[in-house]
Image: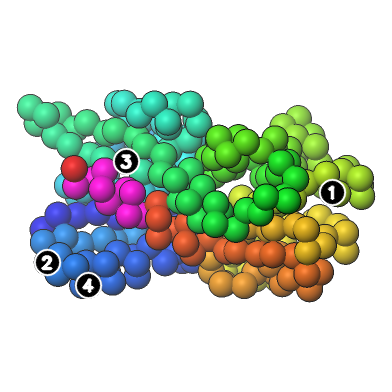
Amino acid sequence: MNQYGLIGFPLGHSFSKIYFDKKFSEEGIVDSCFDLYPIEDISVIREFVEQNRIKGFSVTIPYKESIIEYLDTLDDTARVIGAVNSVKATFENNKLLLQGYNTDYIGFAESLKPLIKDTDRKRAMILGTGGASKAVDFALKDMGFDTLFVSRNRDKSIVYADLYKELMDSVSIIVNTTPLGTFPDVDSCPDIPYDILTSGNLVFDLVYNPAETLFIKRARAQGARYINGQRMLEIQADASWSIWTD
């Protein structure tokens, strides 16, 4: 049996196993399985993969950046982004080889492109500075957008208290890359001035569980366009599957 899975901690919110179980069933794939691996210490990753003979795995919060030091190679995109969400494991002369990739940017870009309007201002705001934010930044810049990072850490970005009206009016797309609002913490959301949002804004929440987060609800109430992370999950998962089985 070919073993695949998701590495991260915690993983109670993840739909990845549901997605791959459905994929395997629909495509008649009977020699593979996908499981969730909630690992509390990423430093054990090589031993864990070797012991469980895992052939490929996705990486989620909080390890998209910290896993890099335990990998043997990175593809060019992952190297430029500085974050990994997909790893292929192979054995060469009985030695484990872990190869890192980033398919988050593919999933984000392909799910966002159909929603962009010609009238959208070419500036986007990224909430959060973790591993997922780096892929989002890469994709947005590749699509011609200037980007602005916002977080709770002034050393890495501007902070939420700095979001005055003129600044908010200068952006069209606002992307939440933080875990705020993820099940079971459904009553939280990024602290932006939602009352300033209009139909000229598009909000993208990378969170997909729940399908409608508080971030999306509050933006929708102001007439903003919106999308959650479900389609991104599916696209990046399919891209990872292609890498693992190539």
Sequence-wise, which precedes: disc 1 or disc 4?
A: 4
Helix, strand or loop for disc 3: strand
User: Is 240 covered by the magenta stretch?
Assistant: yes
From the image, tell me which residue sits under label 2. 30
- Expressed as whole percent of the image width and height from the top left, the position of residue 64 reads 47, 41
* Quadrant containing the C terminus in the rendered view: top left
- Expressed as whole percent of the image width and height from the top left, the position of residue 67 reads 42, 36
Q: Is residue 49 in sight in this rendering?
A: no
**In the image shown, does 10 or 198 lie closer to the viewer?**
198
Under mark 4, the amino acid is Glu
- Binning the other alpha carbons within 10 Å of mark 1 as few (below 14), some (14 to 19) or many (20 upward) gives many
The relative height of residue 156 versus residue 122 in the rendered view (above or below) is above
Under mark 2, the amino acid is Val
- Expressed as whole percent of the image width and height from the top left, the position of residue 234 reads 40, 60
* Quadrant containing the N terminus in the rendered view: bottom left
Under mark 3, the amino acid is Val
The relative height of residue 21 versus residue 68 in the rendered view (above or below) is below
Residue at 41% x, 44% y: name it.
Answer: 103
Sequence-wise, which precedes: disc 2 or disc 3?
A: 2
Judged from this view, the residue extending furthest toward the left is 93
Helix, strand or loop for disc 2: loop
The dot on residue 87 is: 3
Q: CA distance from mark 3 to mark 1?
A: 37 Å
Magenta-drawn segment: 237-245
Q: Which is in the foreground here, disc 3 or disc 1?
A: 1
Residue at 75% x, 57% y: name it.
Answer: 201
From the image, tell me which residue sits under label 4. 26
Helix, strand or loop for disc 1: helix
The dot on residue 168 is: 1
Q: Which is in the foreground here, disc 3 or disc 4?
A: 4
